[in-house]
Image (cartoon, helix red, strand yellow):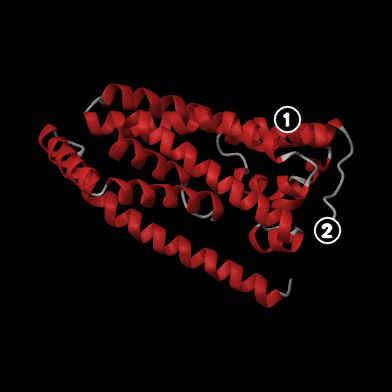
Amino acid sequence: MSEKTKKIIRLSALIIFLVVTAALTVICIPMIPMLTSEEGRLQLEAIVGGIVKENLILGVGAFLLLQVLQVVVALIPGGLIQILGGVIFGGFWGAVLCLLGTLAGEIAVFYVVRLLGMPFVEAVVDQKGIKKLSFLQDEKKCELAVFILFLLPVMPKDALTYLAPLTKIKPSTFFLLSMLARSPGLILSNVFGSSLSEGNRMIAIILFIIVAIIGLICIWYRDKIINLFKSAKKSKHIAK
């Protein structure tokens, strides 16, 4: 893959990021003041309910596409989309749609990487991220890393999504482990969004505090957790 092709891929990812960010800004900014009062929440519920009922297939399809793009384009903030899913579709259906969209995104990335190999990954993941996860070539550590790193917040999930397909891990194993590990975080984000839209501030605050504490702990120990995988056995570099 030429440098020109890699630049085109990076530019395309940046454009998608900017478009999605602009769309999320337009959607979310009017929602914020509505969520602060009972009257606003009822108004938002009526607006969302009307849109969903009249354009159910289009609305669900657009949200699924948004979630797929979040997995494919690492720059797009996943947490915001998941919270938005809870606000619009509720805790249960929001989580279902997020999980389906995430799985579809992972499948797309997995097989594209298997087809195009390391040159494509180098166009998407920086060298620092590739080097940090070089231990993935060890099959046993790869499976454990997929589960642990997808389970914990603030871990390099985006790089992992692109690098895991270059290993010997089976597609079914990767999808199963990653989705099981992603599920708690996705569900919490959706319940948080749903709680905001329903005016359950106490639940929302409790969830926020829990996630914030776990996130801060993981930020503090992130490198140590990754180094545990590296130190278990001498790292092997992913072959190009």
Q: Secondary structure at mark 1?
A: helix
**Alpha carbon of mark 1 to alpha carbon of mark 2: how far?**
23 Å
**Which residue lies at the image location 59% right of the left edge and 67% below the top edge?**
10
How many marks can you see?
A: 2
Outermost right residue: 234
Rendered image quadrant of residue 206: top left
Kindly identify the amino acid type of the residue bearing the numbered disc 1.
Answer: Leu
> Mark 1 packing: few (<14 Cα in 10 Å), some, or many (20+)?
few
* Quadrant of the rendered image containing residue 22: bottom left
Which residue is the site of mark 1? 144
Residue depicted at 37% across the width and 38% down the height:
83
Left or right of 136 on screen, residue 13: left
Is any part of residue 106 visible from this angle? yes
Query: Which residue, given by chain and number where applicable, does mark 2 sit on?
Result: 240
Instruction: Please state which of residues 85 and 79 is positioned toward the viewer in this rendering.
Output: 85
Question: Considering only order in the chain, which callout, 2 or 1, is on the residue closer to the N terminus?
Answer: 1
Between 177 and 39, the residue placed more toward the observer is 177
Can you give x and y, in whole percent of width and height, for residue 234 in the image? 89, 38
Q: Is residue 216 left or right of residue 92?
A: right
Disc 2 residue type (three-letter): Lys
Indicate left or right for 153 with 238 as reference.
Answer: left
Q: Position of residue 15 (x, y in %)?
A: 47, 67
Residue positioned 46% across, 60% down in the render: 17
